[in-house]
């Protein structure tokens, strides 16, 4: 009999541990007063912080509903609740696999294909790509608004301004690149051919991926057809964009509430710019290992550059990441284990 007991392996534990270690080293190198941080954390207004924690559930729910709108339009029939669970599953995979820009989407696609078969894989892929494009667009708008607010408040520095422009340019570049690939079906097919030829070359001719190419071309055709459907359905795209914006707003409010819980209100522009820069790096589809460790360092540094004392910056970063990483980690782990147990039990109960 196959065991369905949840297991915590070293592969799950190591990435968060490495992240904690790197952040602590960063604080040590910059001679941050750790005892003062601990005292500040102990004085946190817990009702406000608890409200921020609840926004994690709201943020993820709205994000899942925005994706569900796209799926439903393409006739991929899953419930909102299941989409919510699949997003949590993908969130967990984002944290434990150092390639957040792709691992969450791959996980969600896998779950739907496992349940409904490969016939809808093109539509599922299109929903994920469209959802990513919408999220990146919302991120660009947010950082533009944030920089505008900082300029009016005279809080922006040349470093922050140039860094913001850099990430706006990078995000727009990848947006344009992905959109071009969505529009130019011939380009996609050429890329598929190149990849298959490279694989065949490295296999020294032992592997003839004829069936794989046929299946990939079929999926690509369904994908491009689905993307064209989105192009002729502005109301669907607008609805998903609105929900994605609300999801992102929940995340921004969470970050702002953390500062309120510390008794240190900050400019909304600081929150918008800092969170947008961190999110932009994670959203660019390069498989950047940016979920654990580097975000803490980046957030603390940006907060400090924008005029927030180092100890407050570090404390706010720690409290924010407890919610956005650790709370998500444990919820996602629970959902992942439950879904896998259900899948295993379902396969064992099927007649042979």
Image (cartoon, rainbow, N blue to C red):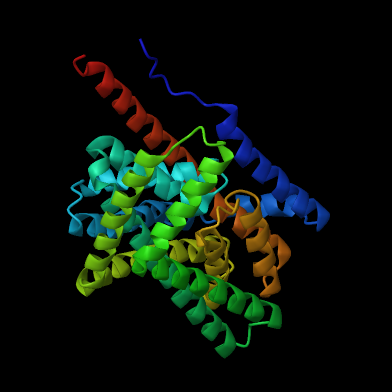
Picture coordinates of residue 146, whole percent (x, y):
52, 78
Q: Nearer the viewer, residue 44 or 115?
A: 115
Q: Is 159 situated above or below 77?
A: below
Q: Is 350 situated above or below 326?
A: above
Q: Is 27 situated above or below 237?
A: above
Q: Nearer the viewer, residue 108 or 249?
A: 108
Residue at x-position 20% and y-position 57%:
74
Picture coordinates of residue 115, whole percent (x, y):
25, 36
The reply, left or right, for residue 45 in relation to residue 244 is right
Q: Nearer the viewer, residue 133 or 83?
A: 133
Picture coordinates of residue 27, whole percent (x, y):
76, 54
Q: Is residue 157 visible?
A: yes
Q: Is residue 266 visible?
A: no
Q: Quadrant of the C terminus?
A: top left
Total label count? 0
Residue at x-position 32% and y-position 44%:
215
Q: Nearer the viewer, residue 149 or 191?
A: 191
Q: Quadrant of the N terminus?
A: top left
The reply, left or right, for residue 265 in relation to residue 210 is right
The reply, left or right, for residue 309 in relation to residue 330 is right
Residue at x-position 69% and y-position 65%:
301
The reply, left or right, for residue 180 in relation to residue 126 is right
Picture coordinates of residue 106, whole percent (x, y):
41, 46
Q: Which of the 4 image quarters holds residue 250?
A: bottom left
Work out which residue is located at the far top of the displayed protein and give it: 1
């Amino acid at each position: 009999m196959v065991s369905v007991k949840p297991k915590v392996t070293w592969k799950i534990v190591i990435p968060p541990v490495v992240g904690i270690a790197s952040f602590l080293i960063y604080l040590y190198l910059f001679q941050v007063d750790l005892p003062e941080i601990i005292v500040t954390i102990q004085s946190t207004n817990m009702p406000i912080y608890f409200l921020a924690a609840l926004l994690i559930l709201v943020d993820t729910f709205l994000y899942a509903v925005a994706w569900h709108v796209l799926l439903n339009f393409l006739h991929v029939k899953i419930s909102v609740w299941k989409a919510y669970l699949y997003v949590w599953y993908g969130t967990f995979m984002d944290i434990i696999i150092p390639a957040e820009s792709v691992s969450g989407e791959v996980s969600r696609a896998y779950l739907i294909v496992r349940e409904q078969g490969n016939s809808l894989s093109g539509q599922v892929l299109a929903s994920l790509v469209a959802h990513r494009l919408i999220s990146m667009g919302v991120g660009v708008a947010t950082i533009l608004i944030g920089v505008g607010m900082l300029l009016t408040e005279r809080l922006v520095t040349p470093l922050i301004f140039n860094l913001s422009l850099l990430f706006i340019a990078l995000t727009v570049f990848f947006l344009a690149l992905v959109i071009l690939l969505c529009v130019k079906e011939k380009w996609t097919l050429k890329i598929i051919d190149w990849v298959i030829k490279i694989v065949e070359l490295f296999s020294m001719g032992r592997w003839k991926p004829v069936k794989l190419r046929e299946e990939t071309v079929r999926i690509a055709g369904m994908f491009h057809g689905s993307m064209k459907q989105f192009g002729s359905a502005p109301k669907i795209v607008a609805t998903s964009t609105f929900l994605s914006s609300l999801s992102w707003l929940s995340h921004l409010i969470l970050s702002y509430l953390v500062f309120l819980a510390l008794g240190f209100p900050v400019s909304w522009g600081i929150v918008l710019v800092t969170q947008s820069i961190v999110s932009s790096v994670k959203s660019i589809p390069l498989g950047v290992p940016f979920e654990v460790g580097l975000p803490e360092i980046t957030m603390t540094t940006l907060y400090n550059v924008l005029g927030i004392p180092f100890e407050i910056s570090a404390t706010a970063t720690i409290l924010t990441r407890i919610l956005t990483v650790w709370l998500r980690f444990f919820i996602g782990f629970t959902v992942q284990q439950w879904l896998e147990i259900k899948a295993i039990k379902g396969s064992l109960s099927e007649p042979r």
